[in-house]
Image (cartoon, rainbow, N blue to C red):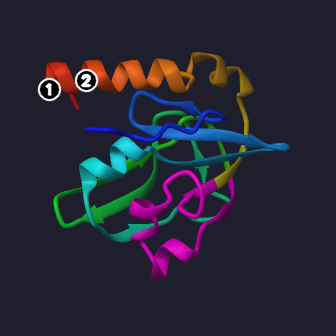
Amino acid sequence: MSYIYELDAKYHKLHTWVRLEGELAVVGISDYAQQRLSDVMWVELPSVGAIVGQGEAVCYIESIKSSGEAYAPVSGEVVEVNSALATKPDLMNQDPYGQAWVAKLRPTHLEELAGLMGAEAYEAFVIEEEQTGGH
């Protein structure tokens, strides 16, 4: 399969991405994750003001194939959510790095970014995961 990678993003091994925009960290799911989910039917967004730690659930996603949580690539306070996903959850399938961002966080531990993968490293990680059948 072929996947799209956002060059300006950093990736978590749990298939979420983060991109810094000023002082905020914009987070979402990767193209790999949205393709594995298939048709996204519903997204439960976090609450503004919620504090999430790196690797903790930042939203819940339900698709025709499966359901599960998307995990925060960095720790922070949720300062904005993408309310468009409540009425158009399929944006996750159409534009995972643009219109389908999940939340904007005020990051609390910027040093966590150093432990994330760039686009090339994440692409290699995805290829290896597909070859080994990992999740």
Name the side, left or right, on which 26 lies relative to 58. right
SS at mark 2? helix
The local crowd at label 1, few if under 14, some if 14 to 19, many if 20 or more residues have their Cα within 10 Å, is: few
Name the side, left or right, on which 9 lies relative to 25. left
**Residue beneath the point at 49% across and 72% down:** 85
The image quadrant where one finds the C terminus is top left
User: Residue 14's x, y, as percent?
Assistant: 39, 34
**Residue beneath the point at 61% across and 39% down:** 18
The three-letter amino acid code for the residue at tag 2 is: Glu
The image quadrant where one finds the N terminus is top left
Q: Which residue is mark 1?
A: 133
**Residue beneath the point at 46% across and 68% down:** 91
Q: 105 above or below 79?
A: above
Front in this rendered view, residue 125 or 61 = 125
User: Splitting the image into 4 quarters, where does residue 19 fall?
Assistant: top right
Q: 37 above or below 119?
A: below
State yes or no: discs 1 and 2 in contact (Cβ < 8 Å). yes
SS at mark 1? loop
Name the side, left or right, on which 120 lies relative to 10. left
User: Residue 131's x, y, as percent?
Assistant: 18, 20
Q: Which residue is mark 2?
A: 129
The three-letter amino acid code for the residue at tag 1 is: Gly
Residue lying furthest bottom: 87
User: Splitting the image into 4 quarters, where does residue 81 fall?
Assistant: bottom right
The residues bearing labels 1 and 2 have C-alpha atoms spaced at a distance of 6 Å
User: Residue 29's x, y, as percent?
Assistant: 46, 48
- The residue range painted magenta reads 78-103
Q: Is residue 5 magenta?
A: no
**Residue beneath the point at 50% across and 59% down:** 95
Q: Which mark is residue 47?
A: none
User: Residue 42's x, y, as percent?
Assistant: 35, 72
